[in-house]
Image (tube, rainbow, N blue to C red):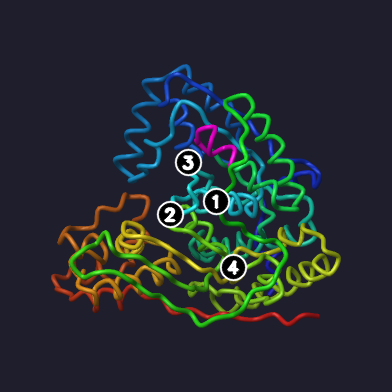
Amino acid sequence: MHIARMVKISYIEKVNAKSPPDISYIFNTDSFVIRALAASFSQKLKLEEDWKKTYEYYNENPEEAKEYVNRVVKGYGHNILQEIDYDAIVFDGISRFATLYLWRNINTPNETYGAGIETSFRIAKPTKYRGEVEEIYLKCLEAYEECLNRNIPPQDARYLIPMGATTRMLISANSRYCNKITKAAAQCPLPELQKISKRLKQIVKKIGCETDEKVPSKWELFGDSQEKDVSIDIFGKSNDPFSISLSAYIRGSLSMYAELVRQRQLRWNIEPVSRIAEKGRFVIPPSFDEDVKKIYKEIAKKAHDNQMDLLRKKDPTFAYYLLMGQEATADVYAHSAGAFELSQARTCGTAQWEIRNFGTEVAKKLANLGYEKKVGPKCWREGIICTEPNTFKTKYNKCPVLSKRTSGEKLKLNEALELLKTEYEVFEVQIS
């Protein structure tokens, strides 16, 4: 099967390989204007559309901005919009790798606080990419489009997309934490992140003071790591939820981590990026049929060959050739609320399936410690009908727990959690 003959790409744009993202600092005395802009990134603004026009529109229509934000917060549960304040930094044309690298730093255990949103490939198509990945990007996007034609969910189709795809992101953080994020970006030898650090340094000088504070953990681009068995350990007392702590070693796709790193109660120590490339392991979404699996393996082989060619030259841009479906390992740490959040929101039938697998295992561990009534999906935990918004209907109609509940069947927690687990395959590409 030659997918290129089956689909038509309506829009695609290459970003110059040497160009940094367009980074803008915005300030507004009406925080709802910036919140509305952030919501539009998440909900409706395509990557090819000019975000500045949207910002100007809401600046001229502040009441509409407020109404829109309230509708999104109440209807979609995007409470993070309420944390966005009077100023923010917009990154336009930033690679998916760079967004993952930056978000990994922003969490409570790293003592670096901030809020923000990026354009999701669940909402917008990945139509822009960095020039470094031009060799494979068109074929990846054609395969992505074919997945959509076959009714494969966008959140699965994106496993075919390289981390050199570009997106749009907004972060709201005070000068202290912007300074820490600046220092973190400077630690990575990838030229894009070096340029991001220099621009952020200019912004920090404008809004605050430069200090020597740094994020206490670092994601290495080059390095080695020791493979371990997957494990999830819960520590604490059965009658004191504040004593609970989580220590886990997990495997999952970069697509999974791109979502999970934004759960800011957790700290993620992802293995060195070079090890992800060297291992050449790829997660297959269960929605992929045999034709799509075949194309996926062809794309993965080509992407992996490029990764290894660049890695041998110590060229940091190898990171752009990582596919979003490429598997990585990570040590995960959380305390109290972070562990319970994993065991609740991340076990919902609408959660990303890899994340849901992790959440259900955490929920089982907490239930065994005596917290059965505090874990599991909200519908089961509170005995209510699914409250997910209409945009998720095609997802939660397939939720096995919802279908059992609507048929009047009562489930025990372990039964619900088993129904929510998703089996999947992983394949490995050999080094050429």
Q: Do the residues labelled 2 and 1 touch (CB within 8 Å)?
A: no
Q: Mark 2 points at which residue?
A: 263
Quarter-wise, where is residue 304 in the image? bottom right
Q: Which of marks 3 and 1 is nearer the N terminus?
A: 1
Check residue 262 for magenta coloring.
no
What whole-number distance in Å separates the C-alpha atoms at marks 4 and 2? 20 Å
Q: Which of 10 and 296 is in front in this view?
A: 296
Q: Which amino acid does label 3 sit on?
A: Gly
Q: Which of marks 2 and 3 is nearer the N terminus?
A: 3
Give the residues in magenta.
171-180
Give the number of the disc on residue 114. Answer: 3
Q: Which amino acid does label 2 sit on?
A: Gln
Labels 4, 1: front one:
1
Check residue 174 for magenta coloring.
yes
Q: Earlier in the sequence, mark 4 or mark 1?
A: 1
At label 2, counting other C-alpha atoms closer than 10 Å, the crowd grade (few under 14, some 14-19, many 20 or more) is: some
> Which residue lies at the image location 62% right of the left edge and 51% below the top edge?
126
